[in-house]
Amino acid sequence: MTHPLGAPLAPRRTPLDAEEKARGEANFASLVAQNLIADGRFRVTADTPEMVELWQRVARDVGDMLQRPVISYANGRYIVIALDQRETPAPPAEIPARHE
């Protein structure tokens, strides 16, 4: 196969098996959780649909792990995972019964 001089080589991605994916997601979730606790957000390159899906799964896992709402948004180059800072409405307080 010929390759023009000066043209960058495209990176080759080796597919992961199911066990490698599961281990990676678990490790990523731990890393992201630590960053969210320290900084409130985590940003990473996610330039393919597969990478966006991976990091969105990680974001869901982190939300479950921290038992807090976590949001993620991607722009085609990177994805940001952050703690949801919007206030969640408090459940309505019980109104004591009036006895007159």
Image: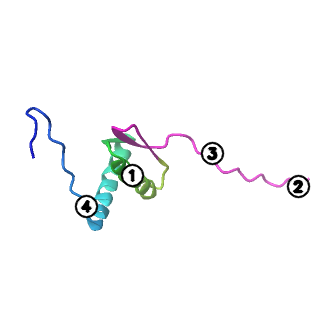
Tell me the distance, in whole angstroms, between the alpha carbons under discs 2 and 3: 29 Å
Tell me the distance, in whole angstroms, between the alpha carbons under discs 4 and 1: 14 Å
Q: Residues within 10 Å of mark 1 (few under 14, many from 20)?
A: few
4 or 1: tag closer to the N-terminus: 4
For label 4, the residue is 16
| Numbered range of the magenta stretch | 71-100
Mark drawn on residue 89: 3
Where is residue 47 shown, x and y percent of the image? 32, 42
Mark drawn on residue 99: 2
Tell me the distance, in whole angstroms, between the alpha carbons under discs 3 and 4: 41 Å
Left or right? Give the position of 11 relative to 67: left
Residue at the image point whose x is 10% and y is 47% from the top: 1
Q: Which label sits in the foreground, 2 or 4?
A: 4
2 or 3: tag closer to the N-terminus: 3
Query: Where, by quadrant of the figure, is residue 4 drawn?
Result: top left
Question: On screen, 38 above or below 67?
Answer: above
Mark drawn on residue 53: 1
User: Residue 99 in magenta?
Assistant: yes
**Helix, strand or loop for disc 1:** helix
